[in-house]
Image (tube, rainbow, N blue to C red):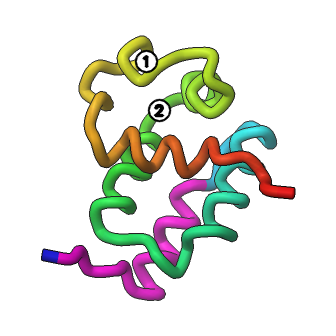
């Protein structure tokens, strides 16, 4: 069964929730929304929310690949969270 995309209001709330204290994280998140905002599902939003529950330094370590999900929090080792983290990390294509 295909997942339902999030609506504009839910997207706006998610973007507000994703505001961070470190510019570096904000850059990863801004790029993520530029690429995927119109394709995000409920599952994606929930997984991104789980990542946003992390502290700024842990999130940055994940985004930069300095730590794995298991090193930060075993509960995050889930397919949906791994998929969203890969989307966050995806480099700019030139």
Query: What is the quadrant of the C terminus in the image?
Result: bottom right
Label 2 residue SS? loop
User: Mark 2 = which residue?
Assistant: 54
Q: Earlier in the sequence, mark 1 or mark 2?
A: 2
Q: Position of residue 22 (x, y in %)?
A: 75, 37
Is 12 contained in the magenta span? yes
Instruction: Using the image, determine if residue 94 lies above or below residue 37.
Output: above
Position of 82 with respect to 38 (left or right) is left
Instruction: Using the image, determine if residue 24 lies above or below residue 94.
Output: above
Kindly report which numbered mark, 1 or 2, lies closer to the viewer in this rendering: 1
Instruction: Using the image, determine if residue 30 lies above or below residue 74.
Output: below
Within 10 Å of disc 1 (Cα), the crowding (few <14, some 14-19, many 20+) is some
Within 10 Å of disc 2 (Cα), the crowding (few <14, some 14-19, many 20+) is few
Instruction: Using the image, determine if residue 48 lies above or below residue 85.
Output: below
Q: Position of residue 39 (x, y in %)?
A: 47, 76
Label 1 residue SS? helix
Residue 7's image quarter? bottom left
At horizontal 54% and vertical 51% (from top left) the residue drawn is: 87
User: Mark 1 = which residue?
Assistant: 72
Looking at the rendering, the stretch of residues picked out in magenta corresponds to 2-18
Residue 44's image quarter? bottom left
Q: Position of residue 45 (x, y in %)?
A: 38, 62
At horizontal 64% and vertical 47% (from top left) the residue drawn is: 90
Query: What is the quadrant of the N terminus in the image?
Result: bottom left
Is 55 contained in the magenta span? no
Residue, far right: 94
Circle 1/circle 2 CB separation < 8 Å: yes
């Amino acid at each position: 069964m295909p997942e339902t995309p999030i609506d504009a209001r839910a997207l706006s709330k998610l973007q507000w929730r994703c505001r961070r204290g470190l510019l570096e994280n904000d850059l990863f998140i801004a790029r993520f929304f530029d690429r995927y905002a119109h394709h995000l599902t409920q599952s994606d939003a929930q997984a991104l929310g789980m990542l946003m529950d992390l502290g700024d330094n842990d999130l940055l370590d994940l985004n930069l690949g300095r730590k794995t999900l298991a090193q930060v929090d075993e509960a995050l080792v889930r397919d949906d969270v791994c998929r969203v983290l890969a989307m966050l990390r995806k480099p700019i294509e030139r």
